[in-house]
Amino acid sequence: MVDRRGQARAWLVMWAGVAIVTLLAIYRLRQFPYHLSWSAAWEGIRPLLGETLWAALKVWAFWGWATLVLGGLALRIEPELEQFDAILVGAGGVWILAFLLGNLLGPIRLFYSATLWGLLALGTAWLWRNPPRHRKLQTPSSGQKLAAFAVLLLAVSYLPLQLGSPVVPFMDVLSYPSSAQRILTFGIYDPFNNDPYGCWGPYAQTPALELFYSALAMGSHTHPAALAESAAMLPMAALMIFATWRLGKTVFDDTAGGVAGLLLFFTCLFRRAQGMRGTAVDFALVALGLAFFMSRGSRLLFAAGALMLGCSIASHAIDGALAMIVAGVGVILWLAESDPGRFAAGVVALAGAALVALPEYLIALGHRAPYPIIPAGQLAGVAAICLAARWMPPDAALRDRRLVAVLNRGLIAFFILAVLYRHAANAFTLYQQVADNLPLLTLLCFAGLIAAFVVQWPADQTRYSGLVAVALLLGIAGEYFDPVLRTLSHTPAGGMMTSDIRIKLWDYWCPFFLTLPAGYLFALAYDRWSRPGTLFILLALLIYPWRQAPHPLDYDSLEHSISEHWAFNLDTASLGYWTGHTDRRWLFGPTDMNLIKVLDDEVAAGRITPATHILHLCTNVSQWWALLEFPVLTGINDDPIEDQHDPNNLWEGGSRVRGMNDLGRALAAAPPYILEQVSPPPGTGDPPPGYQTIYESLPVKLYRRNDLAEVNIAANRWHVYPLLPGLVLWVAAGLLVLGRRGLPAVRAHDEARPVTSFADAGKG
């Protein structure tokens, strides 16, 4: 009793201290350029709640229900699976399933809301008839509690930001909702014609992410897709935090993973993830994929991890490819455990993961493949992963892992020495840049790596901490390969792809993996010294703005406190993000919405099809020059013609963006529609010969080719066909429910026999 009272007092003092630090942090930010005010944020978001709050409830409900269904199926396949791992498998599984189904059914117009709800109903009915074995709810671990607290600290400002942002608030992210909207508008997914935005090259497409966002929109019946995408901001960030916890648990321990989730506030990931861009949110799949793939004793997690790694490549090619390299080194470590069977299974599973990512390679390289080559290749990858999981031998508890412990220390030592050598040999290195941006996190990381090198692990508890060093070593490898790749790049698109690797390494990849050793450093103190004292020090470092930039206009890549993060988000929630547009939240004002309605009417009449491209005359494609980005709400292909065009601009390499000197050739091709935001050169005509004006609101004009005026195809021509798979699935779900009689005896027999393989999962 005395000990419990002492602990309670210590925790009470700790929380009081955190409250004081928080108040001091808020007071220190009184002159901060970003206004930290919840009342101002409320005033800004209140007019939008009818749309954003309702969208959030629908998207969260759909994603949550699908997560529980897939998690329940995972528990049926592997009853001994930890419950929280099952939830994470379900949350990531929705993403994977959308990617696979989109490529299988999208090209034949069957990737539809009815299909998604039919699958959900069938899964629910099957679980109702065959529920997982009843188990007592597990008490949350220390790491899970810390991760949940990180979600709470984030939600304080992230939820107002989400509710005040019907279009995700970050620059150069509008290609994602445009691609998702295209699937909703036309009811078809063509992997090689799903880039309506047109401002980036095909290498920038993220097919898995586009299909996931469109699935959330269709499953939740939220339109436009941009609104469904923004409604998923908070759950996506929560998934990133818990994925970080799970990876930390695999490579270090449970507490280290929870602390790492909190340390994500020091990186740019939450700032960039608010745009739902693949570069940031892909770390949810990267972390879960690596954590599950390297977990011992679970074939289901092994298979789920491989699928997530494959999907991560198609959600962001650079992040996913780097994760595959780390996983490959992990497979080699299994040889050090004298486990050739698991090594062989790992090689086959990674080959299957590469096949799952097949659409990314073909789209990025511009190699068109007829249907059904892509889904056939993906299904072959899934089959290889499942086969590898069946081959994988069960974990041997007594296996000698002393060599792995030696290799872990060797990799950590090699990384530290490599950083020191690069710093001594070069005036400016990647890790010098990382340390300049994230000084405290970098220091904590290196202290944590030294601790991991020194602390003795029991032979039967050896983790794969060396994989963190491998991930961080990729930053140094990128420095050596960067000049070579630049030499081999002879086009703007190639130059953009190669230059982007270094940016992603120092701004995203390395900072993310810095959090794991830093988390381990705090975990040692948390578990071995004082939990209240350690948590107070950690939160004081995170919440109080110890170092402020003098001009924090572009503060994303710099280390910033949680209180500063609140200020960024609340200020955006109160004012809106998209300055320079007629509406700072929706992008489009009432006049622009009239143009969107005209385009929607043209789609409904059948005059605009998936093959239609609109020639768009604009000043330039910068978001800050009031570019009328109609693909965001329509999904129609945009072919921009810039008045201020730079043919050597790497950012536009491989895109459909052209300059005014190409206008003559573009008009000679007789585009079906022409949208003018700037006046064309003299002699072009107003309207051009052969066109008629169908919308005008100065300075915006929309012209339609004369021969399209008589086209009028029934708008409901596809309404029955996409419903067929859903109807079949609903009938199957109904039959399952009606066939419940006589179940108790079947269930008793089923629960008496453990499920030991994937083949056993469907029996009983």
Image (cartoon, rainbow, N blue to C red):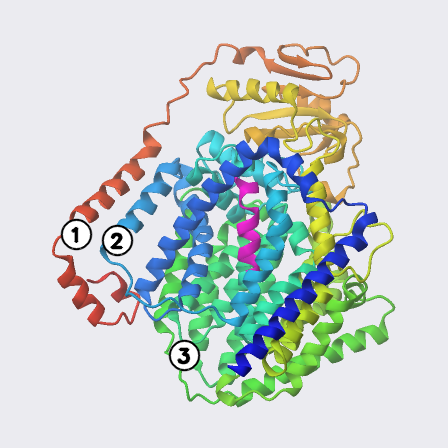
Q: Are marks 2 and 1 in contact (CB under 8 Å)?
A: yes
**Side of 319 where 393 appears, left or right:** left
> Residue 74 at what x, y percent from top left?
35, 61
Identify the residue at image location x=68%, y=77%. 448
Does 92 appear above or below 622? below
Q: Mark number for residue 341?
A: 3
Identify the residue at image location x=57%, y=10%. 706
How dense is the environment of label 1, judged by Cα within 10 Å: few (below 14), some, or many (20 and up)? Answer: some
Q: Earlier in the sequence, mark 2 or mark 1?
A: 2
Tell me the amino acid under the disc marked 3: Gly
**Circle nearer the viewer, 2 or 3:** 2
> Residue 206 at what x, y percent from top left?
56, 47
Evaluate whether residue 347 shows in this view.
yes
Q: Mark number for residue 128?
A: 2
**Side of 167 where 370 appears, left or right:** left
Evaluate whether residue 557 shows in this view.
no
Q: Mark number for residue 555?
A: none
**Marks 2 and 3, Cα distance to the nearest angstrom?**
37 Å
**Marks 3 and 1, Cα distance to the nearest angstrom?**
41 Å
Does 172 appear above or below 307? above
Query: Which element carries disc 2, helix, strand or loop?
Result: helix
Query: Which element carries disc 1, helix, strand or loop?
Result: loop
Q: Is residue 568 magenta?
A: no
Q: Earlier in the sequence, mark 2 or mark 3?
A: 2
Q: Is residue 233 magenta?
A: yes
How dense is the environment of label 2, judged by Cα within 10 Å: few (below 14), some, or many (20 and up)? Answer: few
How dense is the environment of label 3, judged by Cα within 10 Å: few (below 14), some, or many (20 and up)? Answer: some
- Which residue is tagged 1? 740
Magenta region: 228-241
